[in-house]
Image (cartoon, rainbow, N blue to C red):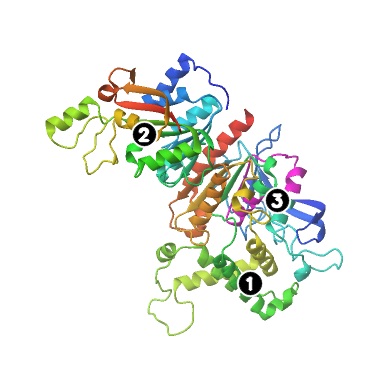
Amino acid sequence: MASSARPLATSKRLVKQVLGRGDYAIISEIVPPGAKVLDLGCGEGELLEWLADNKKVDGRGIEISSALVRRAIARGVSAYQGDINEGLADYPDKAFDYVILSQTLQQTLKPLRVLKEMLRVGHGIIVAFPNFGHWRVRVSHLVSGRAPKTTLFPYDWHESPNIHFLTVDDFEILCQSQKWKIERRFFLSGSRRMQALPNLMAEIAVYLVQGG
Amino acid sequence: MIVETKFAQFDSLTLDCGVTLSHVDVAYETYGELNRDKSNAVLIEHAFTGDAHAAGIDKETGKPGWWDNMIGPAKAFDTDKYFVVCANVLGGCRGTIGPSSIDPVTGKPYAMTFPMVTLSDMVRLQKQLVEHLGIRRLLGVAGGSMGGMQALEWAVRYPEAVASAFPIAATARHTAQQIAFNEVGRQAIMADPDWNGGNYYGLQPPARGLSVARMVGHITYMSDESMREKFGRRLRIKDGPAFAFDDEFEVESYLRHRGRQFVDRFDANSYLYITKAMDVFDIANGYHSLAEALGKTQSRFLVISFTSDWLYPSYQSLEIVNALRRANRDVAYCELNSNYGHDAFLVEVEEQTELIRGFLARVYREAAA
């Protein structure tokens, strides 16, 4: 793994242009050039393609949707059609420098098992998730008396792919209890980085975590 | 694109069984241009009964190649970008040395004195051909069915010579069911009195046996669904049933027709030798596990399977994919939806094109970088 280089400001702008997702911008900032990366729920492989093109990252992806896997492979990304709940079992220990789970944790059947598996196959894990503790979620629930619906959680309860709801504090407490080391944390409101009162104000949280 | 089959001859080839063949002819075709640094060559592997004529229109017969919809300008294997090679396999009957070739020692066809060949032998001969063409490293090796098995063999045997491998609708080894179907084909041929211990050259070939073998084969290449769609229970005569054993169902007529057609273009002894080579093939032979064997590879892999393929079902492709992942190799995998059964790799052009074009283009870019 090559040493970490500070990405240029122009490259950062490009990331946002290309990816349009704040958490991707942060992920591509964390991952150093030449790293070996596994992206869980890689979708059509935009992030991995960008990382390969711009940082010479050796990337792999897992994605359950056949249509998305097809598009990822058509970009030249080594995507594997499979389920992340079981799909990690075949990878050897520490096969990757980083394992990424971007906005999918809340959709996994057994989040703790997935996180443990990620820590087994990766030296570091990057986890991005929407914060269920955000004030809009709280207000939506309080005012409507129904399952919250916001721009981040736009689904009706019966349509939602999200099956586990977690907040920034929930994730911090889990890391503490599992004795995982949080290396870096980023919080986003829209695509803007922020720091104050993350459990209340952050829409997206991105964590870089290492095993205990 | 008008094309012509070319021939190369090699002095000798030593086989896995210990026998050394001499005067080894290989039939092959090429499409597109080899670039200056010889880095754009893609080897296409044909399936069991295929031949070197993979693409373009044959100069003599006027027939398109068996994968013409995948190989050509702006197609999956883009001949504007890549130099594509396809050779008839060892043991075949379409120009490459096989049991119907003349044994230089006796001056007669080898027939059953032709030595037993393996997929590894086939690939070793292709390696000679590729080197003969001045190519040291292939950008890609691709094929469906037995072609995919050879692509695996290439990647394991010559890791440094294969930048990417595309095993499509393939397997690391035959199961009992796959061996069983092949054995039915072989027994049908051998049960035909015209087979005559393999000595039928210049005489009546075992046409009935070979065509029954082909009929069984065809059933395994289709799916229940594709057969229902294509034939259903439709009759060829209006007022059935005829209370006779004529080919009154369309499916009967189709199978008989395909069987008869096959006899004209394929040698029964080649059928025996090649199916045996497929059955004996196990990429993990000589290794402790499939993962150890595939761990030898240095290629990027794109593995493709099809939902309705029950002859080479998806679980066999997944076995390859998971072993590659266990060995921490670079593999992409997609199961494509299709009703066409095993034939899907010949028919489902659009989705395969999307996958292969993009994947190969990146391998090419990375190899050039």
Residue wearing tag 1:
B186
Across and down, in percent, residue B26 comes to 75, 53
Up the image or down, A133 lies above or below B222; here it is: above
Q: Residue at x 43, y 85 (%)?
A: B243
| Residue denoted by label 2 | A177
Which residue is pictured at 46% across the width and 24% down the height?
A30
The answer, for residue A157, to whether it is visible in the render is: yes
Who is closer to the viewer here, B241 or B329? B329
Visible residue check, residue B58: no
Answer above or below: position of A96 versus A5: below
Q: Which residue is mark 3?
A: B28
The quadrant holding residue B77 is: top right
Location of the N terminus of chain A by quadrant is top right
Three-letter residue code for mark 3: Tyr
Magenta stretch, residue numbers: B127-153
> How many other residues sit within 10 Å of disc 2, few (<14), some (14-19) or many (≥20)?
few
The residue lying furthest to the top in this view is A9
Q: Earlier in the sequence, mark 1 or mark 3?
A: 3
- Judge left or right: residue A10 versus residue A21: right
Circle 3 — which element?
Answer: strand
Q: Residues within 10 Å of mark 1 (few under 14, many from 20)?
A: many
Q: Residues within 10 Å of mark 3 (few under 14, many from 20)?
A: many
Relative to B288, say whether A164 is above or below: above
Are the numbered discs 1 and 3 placed on the same chain, yes or no? yes
Q: Looking at this view, is B283 or B246 the one in front?
A: B283
- Magenta span contains residue B76: no
* Residue A70 pos. (x, y %): 45, 42
Report helix, strand or loop for mark 2. helix
Q: Is residue B335 left or right of residue B73?
A: left
- Residue B146 or B36: which is nearer the viewer? B146
Quarter of the picture holding the C terminus of chain A: top left
